[in-house]
Image (cartoon, helix red, strand yellow):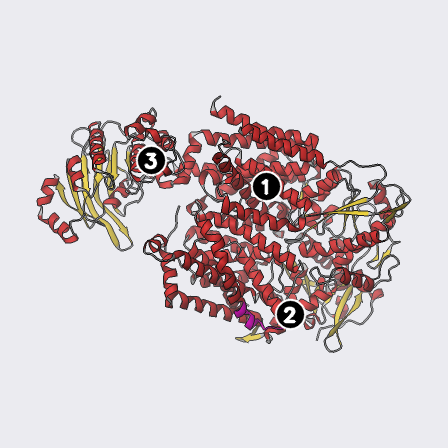
C-alpha cells in the first residue's frame, strides 16, 4: 500500500504539520512543523524538555497527537498503532535501549525481521548482527550485553524491519570516540541506501558529522531550520542555548 | 535430530507414562488429577510463561468449561465429545469478555482476573439460575459417567497441550509473545501486533482450561459449583508451573510430578502437617528458586527443554 | 429503609476501610500484595479472643496491645522475606505467590494451635447495647468499628503527612527509583510500612468477632479478597483512598443486601473489575498504569 | 541426559506405585475402615466433630478388643485409615480412590457435608463400595438406582425441615401467624429446605403468605440491613436457614440491632447449644425456635453410650475445646454405632450385604441419636425428623430447651409472641 521507493518530484517523505501534544497543562509540542526529504539525515536539536523525544514518540505512534498531523508518503498517519507504522516503514531507537532482555541477541533481531515490512522477509540476521559487531553475542540473552551493545542491538532490530524512515534518539551518548566515528559512518551509509534519518542528539560534534541540516526546537516549536553552521550564528538559537546553558 | 522433533519425542514421555501407569497403579483418579494439573500447568505456562500475565482467576475458565460441558449434556442432550467443544466455547466466550483486562498490568491484572473468576462463580451458583446451572444444588451426570474413556480423552488433551507449548517454543508466534512479555513497547517497534498476539495467547490458554474443565466434569460427573470454581486450581497450577520452570516444555510437567507427588505423599502420610509443609514449600520456591527446577538443571549442565 | 441502608453502609464501610488500610499501605510503599493480610487479621482476632478469655482484657485495650505486638513481630518478618523477594525478576507478581504460601503457613499453624471450631467474644465485652442514631438502632460493634477505623485513618494521615518517616514513605510511594537514587533508606521505610500494615490488619481483627459473629483459622482468605476489593476501588497504593473504597463497598453491599440479597457478593467483584477498567488507578488515583 | 532424568523420575514413580499395592489377605487380622476429614478450610468446623466422634467410637471398640463381626464369628480390631482432604474436592476425590484401590479398606465412610461427599459418590459406585455417609444430606445423592450409599446421621434435606412447615401450617393459623419471612443461605442444604418450606406453605391454603423470601450468599456474616428489611415486611414468623456461622451472625446482629420478632426459627442453636451460648450469648437465644436433634433430646440409648456419658467421654478424650462438642460429634459416634450393629448382624462382608444389614436396622436401633430409620430404596435417612424446640429463659442466666412440635412429643408450652 505504501510504495517502497521514495516519492519523486521533490515530495517530502514525512511532513509534520502544526503538531501539538499536551501533557496536562504542559504543551510538549506546540505547533511543530517541518518536512523530511527522502534520503536526508536531519538533526533534531534543542535544550532538554524542548520536545525532541516527544516528537519521535508521536511519529512512531507511542503517543497520538492532540492537534496537527503527521503525513507520510502524502497520507495522514497520526493515531496509527506502532506496529502498523513499522510495517509501512517507520521505525526508531530508544534513548535508553529497550531490548528483550531474556531473548538472545539473535532472537531480538529475528522477532523484528519476522514482523517487519512484508517484502523484507529475507533479512540476513547474522550479517546484520555482524555489521554491529554483535555476532559473537548472538546466542547470549540481551540482558547480558553492555549499554553500548544494547544500543547497537536496538539499531539492528529497527533495521531488520526494513524502515524507510528511522528516528534515532540519542545514540551517541555513552559511546567512546572510536565507536562514534564508526556509528556516524554507518548512519551515512544507511542514508546512502535510501533510508531517511531523523537524529535527536545532544553531541553537536556528532550532529555536525552526520546531518545535512538541523531543526532547532524550543518549547515544542521549531525556531530554526537549516545547516548546523547556520544555526550557531542564528540569534534566536544562541539566546535559547545561552539561556539554558551550553552544556547541552 | 531437529530441535522440534526432539521436543516432540521428549513431550511424548509424560503422555506415554500417564497412559501406562493405570496398568500398574489402580488409583486412576489420582493419576487423572495428575493429568488435569499437567494440562492446567501448561495452560498457565502459555499465558504466564509466554506473556507474563499472571491469571489468578484461571479457575474461572476451568469452571466455565465444566459447566459448559454439563449444561450441554443436561439441556442440549449432547454426547460427551461435542459437549467438550461447548466447554471450550464457554471458556473462549469468558476469555473474550475479559480481554479488556489486558489494559491492566502486573498485580492489577492478577487481582482483576481473580475477581472475574469469583464473579463467574457467584453467577453460576446463584439460585435464580436454578433452571440453567442448577444454582448451588450441584450437578449430577450419571448417564455419561465413563472413567476410562474420559481418562483417555484427558491424555489426548495432554498431548495436544504439549504440542501447543512445543509450537510456542519453536515458532515465530511464541518468540513474539516472549518479546511482548519482555517489553511491549519494543515489541510494537519490532512490528509485533501486541494486542492481537496477546489475545490469541489468552484465548489459547482459556481453551486449554475450558477443555480440561469439561473433561474433569465428565470424569467425576457429580460436582458442586465450589468444586470446579475453586481457587486451588489456579494456585496449584501456577505453583506447579513456576516450580518446574516457565516457558519450558517439560518444566510444568516436572513441577506437577514433583510437587503434586509430594502433596499426595504428605496427604497420605502426615496429613496434619499438610498445609504447613505445602505453604513452606511455596515460600521456599519463590525465595530460593524463582526460575524453577529446570533453571537449576541448566546450571548443573543438564539441558531440559 | 433507604436511609437505614445508607447509614449502615457507612458504618460497615468504615470498618472495612480499617480492614483494607494496612494492605494498601503495604502495597503503596513496598509494592507487594500481601495475600496473608486476612490471616494477620485472623491472628489479631484470636489474640483478642485469648486476651479476653484468659485475662478479661477489654477489646479497647487489646486493640492497642495487638497493634503494637504485631507491628513488632512484622519487623523481622519483613527482613526475612521481602529483600529476597525484591531480588527476583518480577517481585510484584511473585509476591502474590509468596504471600499466598505464607497465608497457608499461618492458617496451618493457627489450626494446629487453636483447632477448627468457631470462637467468639460475647457482645457484652463492648459494654454497650444497640446504639441509636437518627432514631434507628445499629449494632454497637459497628459504631465502635467505625470509630476505631476513623482513628486509625487519622493516625495514618498524621504519620504520612506530619512525620519525617511518613514524608519518606510518600517519596518512596511516588517515585521509588528516585528515592533510591537520592539516598533514602528505602528498605527501612518499607519495613516500617510493612510493620504498620500488619499491625493495622491485626488491630482490625480485634473487632472481627463482633462484626463477623465468630472467628476461625480459615477466615483469612475471604477477608483478603474483600480487602483487595476495597483498596482497588479506593485506589491501590493510596492509603487514604481506602476510606473511599471502604465506604463505596459498604454502602453498595448494604444496598444489594436490601434489594437483591442473593447477588450481594457478585457486586463487589463486578465493581472491582469495572473500576479497574474505567479508572485503573481507583476512584482517587492519579497515575494511570496501563500496560 | 535430560531423557535419562525423566525416565528415572517415572521409574521411581512406578516403583512407588507398585510398592503401594498392598496385598489383601483372606482372614483379616484387622478390619480397615477408611474415611476422610477436613482439618482446614471451609468444611473443617463441620467435618472435625464428626471425625472425632467416629474416632472415639473406634478407640472404644479397640479397647474392647475390636468390633464383633458375624461373618467371622469373632471380634476383630479396627484399623482406622483417615486422610485429610483440606476441604479440597479434587484432593478428596483422589483420597477416596486411594482408600479403595490402595488401602483396600473394608468399609468406606464419607467426609461430612454434601460437597465433600458428592465426589465420593461416583468413585464408590464404580468400585462397588458402599459409601457410608454420616451427614452428606444432599437430596440428589439418594436415588433408587444407586444402591451404594446409605445416610446415617441426619434426615435428607427435603425431610430435614418437615416439622418447620408443618408447624407453620398447623399451628400458625391458631397462633395468628399470617405473614412469614424466609431467609436462607444459597447453598444446596439450606436452599433445598427453603424451597420445600415455600412450596408447602403455598400449597397449604391456610391463607398464610410468604412476605419476604430472600437468599444470601453462604459467606454472609452481616445481617443488620437484612434484618431491617425483614422487619419492614412485618412478618409474624421468621425462618432463617443457614450454616452455624450464619445463624450465629444472624442472632448476634439481631440482638445488637435491638429488633424483636414474634416468632423466629433458626436451625442450629438446638444442635450446637453450647457453642451458641458462648458465641451469641444466652440472652440472644431467648425464645428462639430451633431444630431439636435427637441428640439433644436425651433419648434412652438402648445401644451405646447415653448422651451425658458420651459428652463426658468426649471431654475426657478431647480436652481444650479445639474441636467443639455438638450435634455433629453425635453424628460421628452414631455412625460408628450403626456400623457396630450392622457388622454384628451382616452374614458376609460383602458391600451389599452390609447395606442390607444397615437397612435392616431401620426402626430397631435406638441410640443416643434416637431411632435409626432409613429408606431401603434410596438409602436416605428418613427416621429422624427434627422436632421443633423453643429456647426459654431458665433461672437467672440460664436457658432450657422445650419441645413444642410435633404435639405428641411436646414437653412444654410455647411462648408466642416472644416478649
Q: Position of residue D73 (x, y in %)?
A: 91, 44
Task: Establish if D124 lies above or below C209.
Answer: above
Snapshot quadrant of residue C214: bottom right
Looking at the rendered image, the quarter that the C terminus of chain C falls into is: top left
Graded by Cα atoms within 10 Å as few (under 14), some (14 to 19) or many (20 or more), the crowding at tag 3 reads many
Q: Which residue, given by chain and number where applicable, does mark 3 sit on?
A: A84
Graded by Cα atoms within 10 Å as few (under 14), some (14 to 19) or many (20 or more), the crowding at tag 2 reads some
With C139 as the anchor, is D367 left or right in this view?
Answer: right
Q: Which residue, given by chain and number where applicable, does mark 1 sit on?
A: B259
Most prominent secondary structure in the magenta stretch?
A: helix
- Tell me the residue at 47%/47% (across/down): C93
- Tell me the residue at 87%/62% (across/down): D300
CA distance for labels 3 and 1: 44 Å
Q: Out of B283 and A30, give the one closest to the viewer.
A: B283
Q: Chain of mark 1?
A: B
Q: Which residue, given by chain and number where applicable, does mark 2 sit on?
A: C53
**Magenta segment:** C54-65
Looking at the rendered image, the disc whose residue lies closer to the viewer, 2 or 3, is 2
Looking at the rendered image, the quarter that the N terminus of chain C falls into is: bottom right
CA distance for labels 2 and 3: 69 Å
- Label 3: element kind: helix
Amino acid at each position: 500500500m505504501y510504495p517502497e521507493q521514495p516519492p519523486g518530484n521533490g515530495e517530502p517523505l514525512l511532513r509534520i504539520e502544526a503538531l501539538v501534544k499536551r501533557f496536562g497543562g504542559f504543551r510538549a509540542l506546540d505547533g511543530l512543523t517541518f518536512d523530511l526529504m527522502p534520503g536526508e539525515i536531519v538533526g533534531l536539536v534543542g535544550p532538554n524538555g524542548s520536545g525532541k523525544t516527544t516528537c519521535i514518540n508521536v511519529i512512531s505512534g507511542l503517543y497520538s497527537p492532540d492537534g496537527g498531523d503527521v503525513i507520510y508518503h502524502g497520507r495522514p498517519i497520526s493515531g496509527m498503532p506502532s506496529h502498523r507504522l513499522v510495517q509501512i516503514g517507520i521505525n526508531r531507537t530508544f534513548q535508553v535501549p529497550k531490548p528483550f532482555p531474556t531473548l538472545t541477541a539473535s532472537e531480538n533481531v529475528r522477532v523484528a525481521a519476522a514482523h517487519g515490512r512484508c517484502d523484507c522477509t529475507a533479512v540476513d540476521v547474522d550479517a546484520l548482527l555482524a555489521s554491529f559487531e554483535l555476532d559473537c553475542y548472538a546466542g547470549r540473552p540481551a540482558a547480558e550485553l553492555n549499554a553500548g551493545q544494547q544500543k547497537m542491538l536496538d539499531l539492528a532490530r529497527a533495521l531488520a524491519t526494513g524502515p524507510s524512515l528511522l528516528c534515532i534518539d540519542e545514540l551517541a551518548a555513552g559511546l567512546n570516540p572510536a565507536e562514534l566515528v564508526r556509528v556516524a559512518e554507518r548512519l551515512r551509509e544507511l542514508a546512502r541506501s535510501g533510508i531517511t534519518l531523523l537524529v535527536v542528539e545532544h553531541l553537536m560534534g556528532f550532529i555536525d558529522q552526520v546531518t545535512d541540516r538541523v531543526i532547532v526546537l524550543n518549547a515544542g516549536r521549531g525556531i530554526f531550520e537549516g545547516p548546523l553552521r547556520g544555526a550557531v550564528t542564528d540569534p534566536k538559537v544562541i539566546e535559547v542555548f545561552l539561556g539554558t546553558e551550553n552544556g547541552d | 535430530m531437529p530441535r522440534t522433533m526432539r521436543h516432540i519425542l521428549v513431550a511424548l514421555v509424560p503422555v506415554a507414562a500417564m497412559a501406562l501407569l493405570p496398568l500398574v497403579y489402580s488409583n486412576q483418579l489420582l493419576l487423572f488429577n495428575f493429568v488435569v494439573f499437567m494440562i492446567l500447568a501448561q495452560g498457565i505456562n502459555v499465558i504466564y510463561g509466554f506473556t507474563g500475565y499472571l491469571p489468578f482467576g484461571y479457575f474461572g475458565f476451568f469452571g466455565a468449561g465444566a459447566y459448559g460441558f454439563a449444561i450441554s449434556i443436561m439441556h442440549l442432550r449432547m454426547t460427551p465429545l461435542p459437549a467438550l467443544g461447548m466447554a471450550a466455547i464457554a471458556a473462549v466466550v469468558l476469555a473474550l469478555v475479559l480481554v479488556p483486562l489486558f489494559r491492566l498490568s502486573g498485580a492489577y491484572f492478577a487481582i482483576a482476573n481473580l475477581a472475574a473468576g469469583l464473579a463467574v462463580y457467584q453467577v453460576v451458583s446463584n439460585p435464580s439460575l436454578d433452571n440453567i446451572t442448577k444454582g448451588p444444588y450441584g450437578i449430577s451426570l450419571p448417564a455419561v459417567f465413563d472413567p476410562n474413556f474420559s481418562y483417555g480423552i484427558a491424555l489426548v488433551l495432554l498431548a495436544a497441550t504439549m504440542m501447543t507449548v512445543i509450537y510456542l517454543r519453536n515458532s515465530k508466534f511464541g518468540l513474539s509473545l516472549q518479546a511482548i512479555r519482555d517489553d511491549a513497547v519494543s515489541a510494537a517497534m519490532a512490528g509485533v501486533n501486541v494486542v492481537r498476539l496477546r489475545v490469541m495467547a489468552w484465548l489459547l490458554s482459556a481453551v486449554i482450561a475450558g477443555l480440561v474443565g469439561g473433561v474433569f466434569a465428565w470424569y467425576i460427573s457429580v460436582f458442586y459449583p465450589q468444586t470446579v470454581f475453586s481457587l486451588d486450581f489456579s494456585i496449584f497450577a501456577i505453583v506447579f508451573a513456576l516450580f518446574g520452570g516457565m516457558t519450558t516444555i517439560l518444566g510444568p510437567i516436572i513441577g506437577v510430578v514433583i510437587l503434586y507427588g509430594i502433596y499426595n505423599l504428605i496427604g497420605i502420610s502426615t496429613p496434619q502437617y499438610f498445609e504447613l509443609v505445602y505453604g513452606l514449600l511455596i515460600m521456599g520456591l519463590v525465595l530460593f528458586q524463582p526460575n524453577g527446577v529446570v533453571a537449576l538443571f541448566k546450571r548443573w549442565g543438564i539441558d531440559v527443554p | 429503609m433507604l436511609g437505614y441502608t445508607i447509614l449502615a453502609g457507612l458504618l460497615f464501610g468504615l470498618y472495612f476501610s480499617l480492614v483494607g488500610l494496612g494492605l494498601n499501605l503495604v502495597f503503596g510503599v513496598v509494592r507487594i500484595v500481601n495475600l496473608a493480610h486476612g490471616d494477620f487479621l485472623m491472628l489479631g482476632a484470636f489474640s483478642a479472643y485469648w486476651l479476653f478469655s484468659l485475662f478479661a482484657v477489654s477489646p479497647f485495650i487489646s486493640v492497642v496491645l495487638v497493634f503494637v505486638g504485631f507491628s513488632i513481630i512484622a519487623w523481622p518478618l519483613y527482613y526475612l522475606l521481602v529483600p529476597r523477594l525484591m531480588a527476583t525478576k518480577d517481585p510484584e507478581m511473585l509476591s502474590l505467590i509468596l504471600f499466598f504460601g505464607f497465608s497457608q503457613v499461618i492458617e496451618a499453624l493457627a489450626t494446629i494451635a487453636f483447632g477448627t471450631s468457631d470462637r467468639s467474644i460475647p457482645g457484652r465485652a463492648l459494654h454497650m447495647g444497640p446504639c441509636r442514631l437518627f432514631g434507628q438502632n445499629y449494632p454497637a460493634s459497628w459504631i465502635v468499628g467505625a470509630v476505631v477505623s476513623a482513628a486509625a485513618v487519622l493516625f495514618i494521615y498524621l504519620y504520612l503527612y506530619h512525620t519525617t518517616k511518613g514524608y519518606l514513605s510518600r517519596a518512596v510511594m511516588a517515585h521509588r527509583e528516585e528515592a533510591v537514587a537520592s539516598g533514602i533508606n528505602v528498605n527501612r521505610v518499607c519495613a516500617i510500612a510493612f510493620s504498620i500494615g500488619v499491625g493495622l490488619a491485626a488491630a482490625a481483627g480485634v473487632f472481627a468477632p463482633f462484626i463477623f459473629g465468630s472467628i476461625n483459622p480459615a477466615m483469612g482468605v475471604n477477608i483478603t479478597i474483600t480487602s483487595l476489593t476495597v483498596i482497588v476501588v479506593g485506589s491501590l497504593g493510596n492509603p487514604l483512598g481506602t476510606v473511599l473504597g471502604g465506604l463505596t463497598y459498604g454502602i453498595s453491599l448494604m444496598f444489594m443486601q436490601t434489594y437483591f440479597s442473593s447477588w450481594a457478593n457478585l457486586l463487589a467483584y463486578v465493581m472491582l473489575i469495572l473500576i479497574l477498567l474505567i479508572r485503573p488507578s481507583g476512584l482517587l488515583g492519579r497515575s494511570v498504569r496501563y500496560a | 541426559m535430560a531423557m535419562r532424568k525423566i525416565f528415572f523420575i517415572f521409574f521411581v514413580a512406578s516403583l512407588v506405585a507398585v510398592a503401594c499395592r498392598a496385598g489383601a489377605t483372606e482372614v483379616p487380622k484387622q478390619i480397615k475402615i477408611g474415611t476422610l476429614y477436613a482439618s482446614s478450610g471451609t468444611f473443617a468446623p463441620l467435618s472435625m466433630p464428626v471425625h472425632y466422634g467416629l474416632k472415639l467410637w473406634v478407640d472404644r471398640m479397640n479397647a474392647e478388643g475390636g468390633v464383633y463381626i458375624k461373618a467371622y464369628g469373632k471380634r476383630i480390631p479396627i484399623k482406622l485409615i483417615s486422610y485429610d482432604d483440606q476441604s479440597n474436592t479434587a484432593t478428596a476425590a483422589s483420597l477416596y480412590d486411594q482408600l479403595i484401590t490402595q488401602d483396600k479398606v473394608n468399609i468406606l465412610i464419607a467426609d461430612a457435608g454434601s460437597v465433600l461427599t458428592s465426589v465420593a459418590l461416583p468413585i464408590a459406585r464404580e468400585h462397588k463400595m458402599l459409601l457410608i455417609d454420616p451427614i452428606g444430606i444432599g437430596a440428589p445423592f439418594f436415588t433408587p438406582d444407586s444402591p451404594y450409599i446409605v445416610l446415617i446421621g441426619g434426615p435428607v434435606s427435603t425431610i430435614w425441615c418437615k416439622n418447620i412447615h408443618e408447624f407453620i401450617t398447623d399451628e400458625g393459623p391458631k397462633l395468628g401467624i399470617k405473614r412469614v419471612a424466609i431467609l436462607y443461605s444459597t447453598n444446596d442444604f439450606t436452599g433445598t429446605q427453603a424451597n420445600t418450606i415455600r412450596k408447602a406453605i403455598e400449597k397449604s391454603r391456610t391463607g398464610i403468605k410468604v412476605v419476604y423470601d430472600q437468599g444470601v450468599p453462604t459467606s454472609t456474616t452481616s445481617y443488620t440491613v437484612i434484618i431491617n428489611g425483614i422487619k419492614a415486611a412485618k412478618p409474624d414468623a421468621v425462618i432463617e436457614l443457614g450454616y452455624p456461622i450464619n445463624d450465629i451472625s444472624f442472632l448476634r446482629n439481631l440482638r445488637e440491632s435491638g429488633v424483636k420478632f414474634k416468632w423466629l426459627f433458626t436451625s442450629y442453636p438446638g444442635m450446637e447449644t453450647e457453642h451458641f451460648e458462648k458465641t451469641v450469648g444466652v440472652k440472644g437465644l431467648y425464645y428462639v425456635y430451633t431444630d431439636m436433634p435427637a441428640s439433644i433430646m436425651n433419648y434412652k440409648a438402648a445401644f451405646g453410650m447415653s448422651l451425658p456419658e458420651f459428652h463426658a467421654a468426649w471431654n475426657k478424650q478431647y480436652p481444650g475445646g479445639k474441636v467443639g462438642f455438638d450435634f455433629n460429634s453425635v453424628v460421628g459416634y452414631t455412625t460408628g454405632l450403626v456400623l457396630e450393629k450392622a457388622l454384628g448382624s451382616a452374614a458376609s462382608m460383602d458391600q451389599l450385604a452390609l447395606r442390607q444389614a444397615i437397612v435392616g436396622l431401620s426402626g430397631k436401633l435406638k441410640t443416643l441419636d434416637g431411632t435409626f430409620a432409613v429408606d431401603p430404596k434410596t438409602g436416605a435417612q428418613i427416621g429422624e425428623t427434627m422436632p421443633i424446640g423453643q429456647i426459654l429463659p431458665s433461672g437467672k442466666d440460664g436457658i432450657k430447651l422445650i419441645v413444642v412440635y410435633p404435639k405428641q412429643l411436646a414437653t412444654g408450652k410455647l411462648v408466642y409472641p416472644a416478649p
